[in-house]
Structures are given as structure tokens and as C-alpha cells.
Image: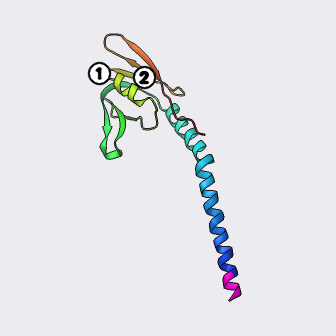
Amino acid sequence: MKKQILYRIIFGFCVLCLLVWFILYNTYWGKKERYNSILTNYSQHQFADLVDSVGYDYSDHNSPKLYLRDGQNIDLSFVLNKAEIMSKCLPGDSVIKKENSLIITIIRSDSISENIQLKFAKAR
């Protein structure tokens, strides 16, 4: 009987330790890893094409996207200034993003070009 109580106390302590570790990981280390992963993914992505349309993908949790003519969908879910990008990109505009850069260049048919820096929420 005393062994069962001791085993339950040890089991409860182990579960509590795992729960505390999970909470600490997600509040500090997890945020930093997610931020670095998002930043790396966006900086390594490159494209140069015409904008087909700008909108929201309702099948993907209503995420904001740039649809390019070559079939690529540029997801702007994690970008803080997505409203600025979506308002300045019009169908028919050329958009260029080089690899290892966080700047999108928008070129209109009337030779107006604009560089927009992608902004992300910092990990705390």
C-alpha cells in the first residue's frame, strides 16, 4: 500500500516536471526557435514574377497571400507589414525578392518601383 502511494507521488512529480519543461520551452526557447525558423525561411525564398492577384486563401485559415503568374503563392501570414505589401501590390505588377534578403521590390508598368522591407515580430 505504501509503495503504491510512493509510486503515485513519483509519477505525479515526473508529470509536473514535464509540464513545467513544456511551458518554459514554449514561452522562451520555442519562440526564439520559431522566430529564427521563420526568418530563415523568408530570407531564403526568392522569386521574380508578375502578380496575378492579391488576396486571402480561405482554405488555409484565411492567410494573406500574393499569387504570382508562375503558380507560386507567397504566404504573408508571419509578416507584420502585410497590409502595406498587399495594398501596394496590384495585379500586373512585377515583384522581385532576392535570396538572403528581406526586401521585396515592386515595379509597376509605369516604371515606378518601391522597396518594402519585410518586418517580423521579434522573439522575446
Image-quadrant location for residue 67: top left
Q: Residues within 10 Å of mark 2 (few under 14, many from 20)?
A: some
Is residue 7 found left or right of 101 in the rendered image?
Answer: right
Q: Nearer the viewer, residue 8 or 107?
A: 8
* Residues at circles 1 and 2 in contact by the CB criterion of under 8 Å: no
Residue 97 percent coordinates (x, y): 45, 25
- The amino acid sitting under disc 2 is Ile
In the depicted structure, whether residue 73 falls above or below residue 16: above
Of residues 111 and 72, the one nearer the viewer is 111
**Along the viewing direction, whichever of 21 and 56 lies nearer the viewer:** 21
Q: Residue at x 31, y 46 (%)?
A: 59
Q: Is residue 30 above or below residue 17?
A: above
For image coordinates 44% across by 29% down, the residue present is 81
Across and down, in percent, residue 1 comes to 68, 89
When the figure is inspected, residue 77 is found, relative to residue 115, above or below; the finding is below
Residue 47's tag is none
- Residue at the spot of label 2: 96
How many numbered circles does the render carry? 2
Residue 92 disc label: 1
Q: Residue furthest bottom?
A: 1
Query: Is residue 63 one of those drawn in magenta?
Result: no
Q: Main secondary structure of the magenta part?
A: helix
Q: Position of residue 32 (x, y in %)?
A: 60, 42
Where on the picture, by quarter, is residue 35? Answer: top right
Q: Which residues are magenta?
A: 1-5
